[in-house]
Image (cartoon, grey):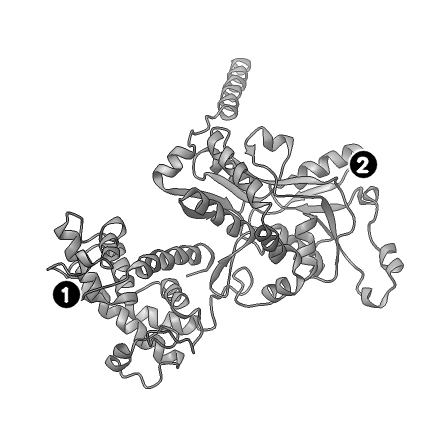
Amino acid sequence: MKILNLILAIFISIILLSCGENKEIVEIDLDKIKEKGKLVALTGYNAYSYFIYRGQPMGYEYELIKKFTDFLGVELEIVVVKDIDKMFEMLNNGEGDIIAFNLTVTLDRLEKVEFAHHHNLTNQVLVQRKPENWQKLRKEQIADSLITNVVDLIDDTIYVEKGSSYIERLNNLQEEIGGKFIITEADPEVSTEDLVEMVSLGIIDYTIADANIALLYQGYYSNIDIETEISLPQKIAWAVRKTSPNLLKELNKWIEAMRRKPEYTAIYKKYFLSQSSIQRRMESEFLSIRGGKISRYDNLIKENAKKINWDWRLVASVVYQESQFHPTAQSWAGARGLMQLMPSVVEQYNVSDPYDPYQSLKAGTKYIKWLDEFWSDYIKDDTERIKFVLASYNCGFGHIIDARNLAEKYGNDPNVWFKNVETWLLNKSKSKYYQDDVVKYGYCRGIETVNYVPDVLNRYEHYKELIKS
């Protein structure tokens, strides 16, 4: 009986393993992505791929994937994934459409996904710490204290990012040199950047990084050495599902065109080669991966957002949209300060100095609360009402009333913003509509407000993804 039970257990294990290996990949290609109007990009959260700096979403991968979605004519949704293995899993089960990350192309990965044309070539390097008094030593003396031949790593412990291609490379390297390393995968929450910092601080002795990434961090951690190469040049590329051939075709076409533009070189330099700007970002408390702050006014924003029961990150997105956090900002229309208060709002809330951040935020959020209460009589859904509040804040609630009246008259839903009321706000720039009997507030250009609402909301999504509440 024991033997029969053992055989049965082995048989069941084989079946389960077989099912796992042959798990079906979802079929979502370019046509379905365009149909839903959105591409979901999976990426990492670090100082080069995707982050928030001084209130603005930034990153090499972020800028490029945004340009690709603009090329496709679809919206972009960013999903941050900390575990590289999880990225491939999410891609193939349809939780993402593309992996826009610094991925090394390997044979093992090619069995799981299709890679686009590579962005660049790089090699993997050993990251190690220079001796404590390295500034006082000659170059030869520093070299004598470092690992310059990978054979000397035998029996040493090397920490690497979980799921990274560094593991595969180190395993192959062990075969090549006939010796073993102690390869330790870090916790999924620990990135390559974290490991580089740990080397710099003396917590660990060695890690592996792509040379372009290592060079970036060397500008900040001056006591690390990245000269010892452990691989030949390798391709760095984005990945799509094997069931997305048309997406891959369009992506390749776009990459080939993009790489010929000076704009591509400028983006690469900004994130990997400009040491002064890299160091400035890395030292800033307004870099989300370091200080976790959006602006110097975060505490003031939180205090006022709480009074109106709004997420402070949404209010921060409004402030960025209005003034980019510059308290002395002025507009051609007479709006002033952090929240670009119009003269009527300044008067309504007795603001003595619209350039004073405290007064500006206090009055601006009070006005938001007033707009929210006004629209609560008409727009019952909280999420939808935010769009009407934002639109009203930008161009005045009177123009939004007109747009709702036009939407209702011409058969659209007056309580839905996107593709309904926003359409009629745009139409208020045409005499046929701004002279309509249901319109009371006249001409409105509209396009600025139509762009304003999604800009604020999209930035808010970035803030929610990367900034703690």
Which residue is at the far front?
A: 431
Q: Amino acid at mark 2?
A: Gly
Instruction: Say if mark 2 contacts mark 1, CB within 8 Å.
Output: no
Q: Residue at x 47, y 26 (%)?
A: 23
Q: Residue at x 43, y 58 (%)?
A: 463
Q: Amino acid at mark 1?
A: Lys
Q: Position of residue 380 (x, y in %)?
A: 19, 56
Viewer-closest of 410 and 107: 410
Viewer-closest of 369 and 452: 452
Q: Residue at x 27, y 77 (%)?
A: 345
Label 2: few (<14), some or many (≥20) within 10 Å? Answer: some
Whichever of labels 2 and 1 marks the residue nearer the N terminus, that label is 2
The answer to whether one can see residue 388 in this image is yes
Which residue, given by chain and number where applicable, does mark 1 sit on?
A: 440
- Establish if 225 lies above or below 319: above
Secondary structure of the residue carrying tag 2 is loop
Q: In the rendering, which numbered label is found on residue 177?
A: none
Q: Residue at x 60, y 63 (%)?
A: 282
Can you say which quadrant of the picture contains the C terminus? bottom left
Q: Which circle, 2 or 1, is nearer the viewer? A: 1
Which residue, given by chain and number where applicable, does mark 2 sit on?
A: 179
- Establish if 456 lies above or below 166: below
Q: Position of residue 21 (x, y in %)?
A: 52, 25
Which residue is at the far left?
A: 437
Residue 303 picture quarter: bottom left
What is the C-alpha distance between the residues marked 2 and 1? 82 Å
